[in-house]
Image (cartoon, helix red, strand yellow):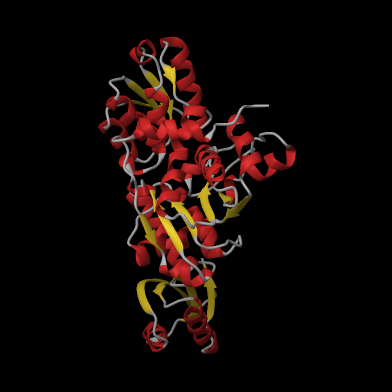
Amino acid sequence: MTALVTLDDVRAARELLSGVVRETPMEPSRTLSAQLGGPVWLKCENLQRAGAYKVRGAYVRIARLSDAERARGVVAASAGNHAQGVALAATSLGARSTVFMPTGAPLPKIAATRGYGAHVELVGATVEEALVAASEFAERTGAVFIHPFDHPDVIAGQGTVALEILEQCPEVKTIIAGIGGGGLISGLAIAAKALRPDIRIIGVQAAGAAAVPPSLLAGHPVRLSETSTIADGIRVSIPGVLTFEHIAKTVDEVVTVTDEDISRALLALLERNKLLAEPAGAVGVAALMAEVVKVETPAVAVLSGGNIDPLLLLRVLEHGLAAAGRYQRFTVRCADRPGQLVRLLALIAENGANVLDVAHERYDARLPLGEVVVAFSVETRGKDHAERMVAALRAAGHTVTFD
């Protein structure tokens, strides 16, 4: 059995973090409040220093090293947020930091990590490979390895988010947050339940990287054979040993959301709340929007980070629009006759849709003689509107297929 972090540990961590991290704001979500029939708030850790809650745990861990340990430097492995948190914390405390990142890590996150003072090494295709390299570096050089989640100081630092939530919304009944390795949800649950045992703590994982549910069933951490999700910040194949103990004992429920749910949540946060979150940071909102869990209000969803690659943001927004039925890509097969394309465009316009892109193909060998394929990208007002438009095309005798 592993000793859990305590409320006193979290309170001590908050003292260390005083004047270092930002007490992030809570923003109301009118859309979610209307949907759930009670107040819903967003805890904006996407507005934290370095763009995510990770700096809390990283700073506490490095601050509690001895002078001799800090003199040896620190090392970490991460695809982004932990990297930036460690770099910022280490520089603030006068320690050298080396961070190993996967070769495919987003360029803005690499640049930000270097900007906070870390020496960055790009190694391997996954965070797991970067972790191996970081561990080898620690053994070779004596640098102290800063684990992204599985350490008491890291968990205590992340738990300070809960202390702020309870001060900002004392009547809260449900706190919902994402789970990758489990550091954030562990700290949240320990602190919140120590102060308010009646609060429900709900964890959310991406469906393509949900290692916690099978681990809870097995009674120990279980490694997934593969993971796939747009939420790279919580794409972790196995929970930590220490964090698993916290989750098993203090978290009330763990649910999953799809990439489509996450995309819709990101779009809604931008449009309705004017808040930019990364996919991993929006999974709590995604779970509420998709109603994969029933919650008591007042509820607080933690927006855990806002560090998103602009190129990924473009793709995710397009995906979110498509998932919401507001963006359609489809092809129409029709007779190759003069004026046919004009009639197709007119029919789409008559049904109130906006054509964004058109590609006309008549020389595909797979097409019957005398037929053409026209590919459309179309903006619609939602699923019902899109269905009416497609129905009108089919009623006019056209064959419609989707990408």
Look at 52% across and 30% down and name the residue there: 128
Q: Up-down: is 1 above or below 278?
A: above
Q: From the image, which quarter does the N terminus lie in?
A: top right
Residue 158: percent from the left, percent from the top?
A: 45, 38
Quarter-wise, where is residue 86 in the image?
A: top left
Number of numbered discs: 0
Taking depth in this image into account, of 37 and 306 the one nearest to the observer is 37
Quarter-wise, where is residue 248 in the image?
A: top right
Q: Up-down: is 36 above or below 108?
A: below
Quarter-wise, where is residue 63 in the image?
A: top left
Whether residue 211 is visible here, answered yes or no, is no
User: In the displayed structure, does residue 180 sit left or right of residue 114?
Assistant: right
Taking depth in this image into account, of 260 and 371 the one nearest to the observer is 260
Look at 39% across and 38% down and name the residue there: 81
Taking depth in this image into account, of 252 and 208 the one nearest to the observer is 252
User: In the displayed structure, does residue 106 sit left or right of residue 288?
Assistant: left
Q: Up-down: is 391 above or below 53?
A: below
Whether residue 296 is visible here, answered yes or no, is yes
Residue 166: percent from the left, percent from the top?
A: 45, 50
Residue 226: percent from the left, percent from the top?
A: 61, 40
**Residue located farthest toward the right when viewing the structure as drawn:** 218
Taking depth in this image into account, of 198 and 309 the one nearest to the observer is 198
Look at 59% across and 47% down and name the residue there: 197
